[in-house]
Amino acid sequence: MSNEDAATNREAVNPEAVNPPDGGADAVVLTGAEIVCECLLHEGVDIVFGYPGGAILPTYDALTRYPQLHHVLTRHEQGASHMADGYARATGKVGVAMATSGPGATNLVTGIATAMMDSSPIVCITGQVPTGAIGSDAFQETDVTGITLPITKHNYLVTSIDELPEVMREAFHIARTGRPGPVLVDIPKDVQIQEAEFVYPTEPIQLAGYSPPKTARARQVAAALELIRDSERPIILAGHGISMAGANEELAQLAEKAQIPIALTLLGKGAISEQHPLCLGMMGMHGGAEVNHAIQQADLLIALGMRFDDRVTGNLATYARDSRKIHVDIDPSEINKNVTVDVGIVGDLGEVLRQLLDRVERRPNEAWFDRIAEWRADSELREIVRPAEAPQHPAVPEGKLLGAQVIRDLFEFTAGGAITVTDVGQHQMWEAQYYQHERPHSLITSGGLGTMGFGLPAAIGAKMSRPDQEVWAIVGDGGFQMTMMELATAVQERVNVHIAIINNGFLGMVRQWQEFFYEERYNQTPMVNPDFCKLAEAYGIPTVRVTERGQIEEAVNASRAQTAGPTLIDFVVEKEEIVFPMVPAGADLDDMIRRPTPAEFERQQRERAAAAEIPEAATTPEPEGTEPEAPAAAAALGSRFGV
Amino acid sequence: MAKHILAALVENRPGVLARVANLFRRRSFNIDSLSVGRTQRDEMSRMTIVMESDSAEADRLVKNLYKLVDVVHVDHLHSQPSVVREMALVKVRATSDNRREVIQLCDIFRARIIDVSAESLVVEITGEEEKLENFTELVRPFGIVEMVRTGMIALGRGGHTLKDEGFKPNRSRAAARSNVL
């Protein structure tokens, strides 16, 4: 996160705190629970997402004396950790989740792992059984610091009230600095009840084993500049790190100054406006074909704040084989982890990019841009989402609503200005393909962990941290049902989040894999769903169902007209739509399954029709007892979008 | 593939060993030995980690150790002059018939006999790994009843010292410190 955001976090300290930072050092005697609240105020926290229970009750009681800390009662602790995550991602501020011991703490786990994978700064505060009972398998005891060891940036079990202020301060410091991440603080009930003199520590935090890197070494910067100067087909791979470091402006300047095209990771969306002429769009498994071709044909990769996830590299053995590679990341352990690079630079992206900008030279890349334009023209031929008045791709079935169209229209009718929060699956990839983001922190999605159920609670958290922004939760019917109990939270808190369910009655992405790789055995992917509109009505949420493209605009406008409380649109879309292009897991990045061009599609249709006639014309008699292959199968195949 | 010896200075806090051990498991590092003990300063412990790997893997372990907040400093000891020792206690079957032979072997290896019974001897032997292995091979025919090795410990020679500056224990936390184990 940027220094600016860190400053905002600190400046937001509530003046009513018992020990204002500028006030006298008169110590007051407080309980551990009150100290927790004081520390939250000092960190600039305004909202806590949580769920009470036995071991955290003293802190919930103390919260009644701190009305400046608004507590949001979720319907499940997983919702609390996702809301804290959404809150954090929308602003860069640290999100806070609170839960009791045992099941309360374990229910946070999925949200913590999600935040860890996507480097999101959250602090989770859990109650624990009293210190004397730890290790005795007491009621609602669980070793949550043990459980979250591999999925937190750091965690604490507070064993004495004396260390509580320092631990709280360190927890926020560690969560928000360097490569951000989740920190958990586990506080036994007796520590919450004990009393101690409270003086907020003012000396700078000193952690001997923790000092996030800042600037790059001059020698590495020089080496990177040399590679850039010698390149003919360079490409920048921009990740989540750009927006977290607040280095968006520097990224644009570098690309413009050296004339280098930019490919985005999923979480990199928003690093630069997708309307920018140098921005190619998303790379990877469902990235643009032209982007993946450009990466494979590049002679220089400049990877900035991204980590070469397997979903963006495909087969590592053949990944960008002919390119030199520069990798800038704040986390040293990411350098040479998946992809061996020529120049690895550890540092804060803003600082490093400014170091590069000082000396980078303008260089012409016309031939390179021409090649990319050719690949893009081919992609455009295959495009399925077109303006209603334009000639349609023949694969689009008449009168069917496509998920991809819904997202593109949502982009149009929200003027591309919303914060979108997605769940995980096909709708998430369509969002990435068809909703073009201009600003940082405007797409919130679970990229690394791929957590179904993330969308709705994260959207609630995002809206609560950015009440001035329009927030859309774009979810599938599968993931929505994993955390849909948080509708009640949205209603109780009157959170104005617009929910768009892309409802195909299938676990669509899994179904797509079954179609491609498991011979269309759709095991456990069709879903019998509730009537989502009636469900919304039960919560008193305004709702509408959309089944045709022509209804989208009115439905979206009606949702946007609601400015208090949640709204819900049930988009009933084509059941067996496919996300194209697709790089099968482990395949080479440019070995993509593509949607056919109109000409290819029509040829395939003719071939299928011809193939379907062969069984009738065949002279060989069928063995008795077997049915001739039904031509319907081929026809059904043909109704699909190309494959 | 080569043997890599890493020394890590860590804060002497509860749970540090679990964090390091968890890292080995989580990132699939294959560790030959790990030994932990106190140092000249109460607030820190020192770990010696030995792994058989290529140097990229060893680098990866160093970087990941640094990601742990409680790990203050890590050094690659094989890349600098250092002294390496390991101790073993070996209970060798030895009766009045062959005890003399075993004692002779111990003398050659400068190993000490620290317990004698009618059926066996307990031998304490210190040295580099190879010496310990040679010794155990030679006494194996007599019968090794049980044995234990400490794992390697190592220090850089002369001026090659692990940095511990910047290591200021937190005031209020000092009371809560306990052994790393």
Image (cartoon, helix red, strand yellow):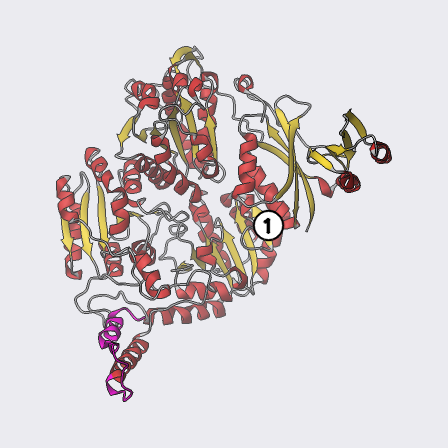
Q: Position of residue A102 (x, y in %)?
A: 36, 29
The residue under the point 40% across, 16% down is: A190
Q: Is residue A466 above or below residue A573?
A: above
Q: How many marks?
A: 1
Side of A241 relative to B54 (left or right) = left
Using residue B49 as the reference point, say whether residue A207 is left or right of it. Answer: left
Q: Residues within 10 Å of mark 1 (few under 14, many from 20)?
A: many
Magenta stretch containing residue A630, yes or no? Answer: yes
x then y, percent, for residue A48: 32, 29
**For residue A387, which quarter of the picture?**
bottom left
Q: Main secondary structure of the magenta part?
A: loop
- Quarter of the image with the C terminus of chain B in it: top right
> What's the residue at 46%, 25% (across, down)?
A157
Q: What is the span of residues highlighted in magenta in the rendered image?
A: A616-643
Residue located at (38% from left, 35% from top): A93
Residue B174, x across and y down, in percent? 56, 18
Disc 1 is placed on an element classified as helix
**Which of these two is toward me, B177 or A6?**
B177
Q: Is residue A497 visible?
A: yes
Question: Which residue occupies the foreground of this view, A223 or A431?
Answer: A431
Asked if residue A137 is among those painted magenta in the image, a careful observer would answer no
The amino acid marked with disc number 1 is Val
The residue furthest bottom is A619
Compared to residue A582, the image places residue A444 above or below, namely above
Q: Report the chain holding disc 1.
A: A
Residue B55 in the image, given as x and y percentages of width and height: 66, 49
In-front residue for pair A453/A24: A453
| Left or right of A636 on screen, residue B153 | right
In the rendered image, the residue lying farthest to the front is B97
Q: Which residue is mark 1?
A: A221
